[in-house]
């Protein structure tokens, strides 16, 4: 078998039928195109897959390698080539988050302030993502109707959960909706009326970095979800409740969202005063 664009489109359609999220579909098809580029028109073989994994190991982090492998393995299952699936790399879980990628409250406030001055729609997108903790792919569930109700029902990956819209956010969104003259449908849409695309939102967020004095490494939609998770946990200290709000089925996934940074661990160790 040779991986062609036609095969990649068929795989993408398959993922859609399986109700995978747009973000997952984009990630899996990107990984498959990367593999096709590596094979350079050659046939898909186990030897080629092993060479692809070896190349990845020299170029990217182990977690990223496993992301590519998971995507390729899903394709192999789809293509009836399960005997060619690759083993994931063994990785040791890092005990803390990288400080240079954590968005602080002060940095978030500067981003919001910059957005408020230059892009009213982006401002409301930022406070909606941060104020509810939703995924960027779930932003389409924030509609005129759900804002009026103060809650939205999200159905993704075969699961259903309720997103609550805080009172302050509801008031701001209602004013935004009235200003735009929307009567129904998505709150955040393009001029043609289509829901905002996640890549456009991410690009617009990057455009705020200089004015907000925030590192571009910290500015991407999912980091607002992490900020929400940390502040929610700090306020309630209940991991199970946070998992419900975020829509996680495993507490281990939620725990990753509230890990402390290396700097925080360092400060705690200094307070122990055991070096005497």
Image: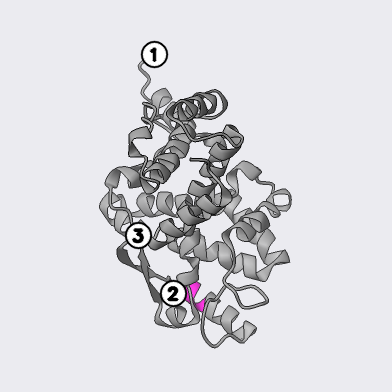
Name the residue tied to disc 3: 157
Was residue 124 drawn as part of the magenta stretch in this picture? no
Q: Residue at x 48, y 58 (%)?
A: 22
Helix, strand or loop under label 2: helix
* Residue 42 seen by the camera: yes
Check the picture and name the quadrant holding the C terminus.
top left
Closer to the camera: disc 2 or disc 1?
2
Tag 1's secondary structure?
Answer: loop
In the displayed structure, 17 sits above or below 175; it is above
Instruction: Say which of marks 2 and 3 sits in front.
Output: 3
Q: Earlier in the sequence, mark 3 or mark 1?
A: 3
> Magenta residues, as a range?
166-171
* Front tag of 3 and 1: 3
Q: Residue at x 33, y 34 (%)?
A: 83
Alpha carbon distance from label 2 to label 3 = 28 Å
Rendered image quadrant of residue 60: top right
Residue 205 drawn at (x, y percent): 64, 56
Q: Looking at the image, which residue is at 47% across and 30% down?
A: 49
Residue corresponding to mark 1:
275
- Taking the spot 38% from the left edge, 31% from the top edge, the residue there is 86
**Which image quarter: residue 100?**
top right
Query: Secondary structure beneath disc 3?
Result: loop
Looking at the image, what colour scheme do you see? one colour
Q: Look at mark 2 in the image and give the residue it sits on.
A: 167
- The picture quadrant where one finds residue 114 is bottom right
- Within-10-Å neighbours for mark 1: few <14, some 14–19, many 20+: few
Q: Are marks 2 and 1 in contact (CB under 8 Å)?
A: no
Q: CA distance from mark 2 to mark 1?
A: 49 Å
Place of residue 126 in the rendered image (x, y in percent of width and height, measured from the top left): 57, 62
User: Where does residue 6 sit, x and y in percent of width and height?
Assistant: 55, 53
């Amino acid at each position: 078998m040779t991986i062609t664009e036609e095969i990649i489109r068929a795989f993408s359609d398959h993922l859609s039928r399986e109700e995978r999220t747009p973000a997952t579909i984009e990630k899996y098809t990107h990984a498959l195109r990367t593999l096709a580029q590596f094979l350079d028109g050659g046939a898909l073989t186990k030897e080629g897959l092993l060479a692809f994994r070896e190349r990845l190991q020299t170029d990217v982090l182990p977690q990223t390698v496993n992301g590519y492998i998971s995507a390729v393995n899903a394709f192999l299952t789809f293509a009836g080539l399960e005997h060619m699936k690759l083993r994931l790399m063994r990785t040791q879980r890092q005990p803390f988050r990288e400080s240079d990628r954590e968005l602080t409250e002060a940095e978030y406030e500067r981003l919001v302030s910059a957005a408020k001055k230059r892009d009213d729609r982006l401002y409301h997108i930022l406070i909606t993502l941060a104020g509810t903790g939703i995924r960027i792919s779930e932003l389409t569930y924030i509609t005129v109707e759900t804002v009026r109700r103060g809650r939205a029902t999200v159905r993704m990956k075969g699961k259903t959960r309720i997103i609550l819209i805080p009172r302050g956010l509801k008031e701001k969104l209602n004013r935004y909706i009235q200003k735009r003259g929307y009567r129904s449908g998505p709150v955040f849409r393009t001029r043609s009326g289509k829901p905002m695309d996640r890549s456009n939102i991410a690009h617009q967020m990057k455009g705020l970095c200089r004015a907000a004095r925030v590192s571009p490494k910290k500015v991407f939609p999912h980091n607002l979800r992490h900020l929400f998770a940390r502040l929610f946990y700090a306020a309630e200290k209940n991991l199970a409740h946070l998992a419900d709000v975020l829509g996680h089925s495993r507490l281990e996934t939620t725990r990753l969202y509230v890990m402390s940074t290396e700097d925080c661990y360092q400060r705690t160790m200094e307070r122990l005063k055991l070096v005497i």
